[in-house]
Amino acid sequence: MNTKIGVNQEFLEKSGFILARIVSDEFVLYIKTKNAHWNIEGSDFYNKHIFFDELAEQLEDAIDQVAERIRSIGLSAPGTMKMFLQLTGLSESSRESNDSLGYMQELLADHESIIIHLRENINRIDMEFNDAGTSDFITALMEKHEKIAWMLRAHLK
């Protein structure tokens, strides 16, 4: 059944494809953040263990919100690792050490990559696809990633 929300089906599908990439990026970043949480080592273990877990919780919430946005525009959200890995713009971790500095640099780069992807699509989704709801949604998501990126940068100084 077509979703009748004032946006034609073709444009909803285009918005949905962008959202599928976003939820895939969020999921891959979530796994990478949980990896940091589980495997962090060093004199700052306890603080960073808690910090990474808090970041993972925020990402888990974002994943759910993006998937629900996809569903709210009448499409199916990707939900398998195979699909996430096919759609993501991020790469999996290939770390040799479990130090906080390395994890933070890698996670910061991924958050910044997501911010750029979101920013590139805000106006496109609004103006080209006439989907202000999704545009507003990803604007708010971008702001969350900007805050996390700021926190990671602050740790790296």
Image (cartoon, rainbow, N blue to C red):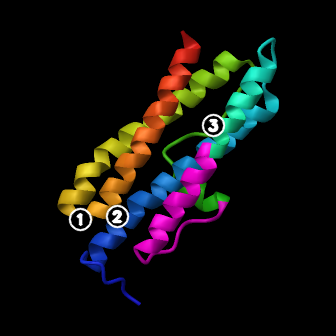
Q: Is residue 5 magenta?
A: no
Residue 96 visible in the shown view: no
Q: Residue at x 43, y 59 (%)?
A: 19
The kind of residue on which mark 1 rests is: Phe
Badge 3 element = helix
Question: Looking at the picture, which amino acid does disc 2 mark?
Answer: Ser
Of the residues under marks 1 and 2, which one precedes in the sequence?
A: 2
> Sequence-wise, which precedes: disc 3 or disc 2?
2
Residue nearest the viewer, comparing 94 with 133:
133
Mark 2 Cα shell of 10 Å, populated few (<14), some (14-19), many (≥20) = many
Percent position of residue 109, x then y = 51, 28
State which quadrant residue 117 falls in: top left
x and y percentages locating residue 44 in the rendered image = 77, 15
| The C terminus - image quarter | top right
Q: Quadrant of the N terminus?
A: bottom left
The residue under the point 71% across, 26% down is 95
Any mark on residue 55, and which? 3
Proximity of marks 1 and 2: CB atoms separated by less than 8 Å: yes
Tell me the magenta residue range: 58-80
Q: Which mark is residue 15?
A: 2
Residue at the spot of label 1: 129
Q: Position of residue 86 (x, y in %)?
A: 55, 56
Could you say which quadrant of the image residue 116 lies in?
Answer: top left
- N-terminal of the pair, mark 1 or mark 3, is 3
Residue 91 visible in this rendered orientation of the protein? yes
Relative height, residue 127 to residue 120 (above, below):
below
Residue 71 in magenta stretch: yes
Front one among 103 and 61: 61
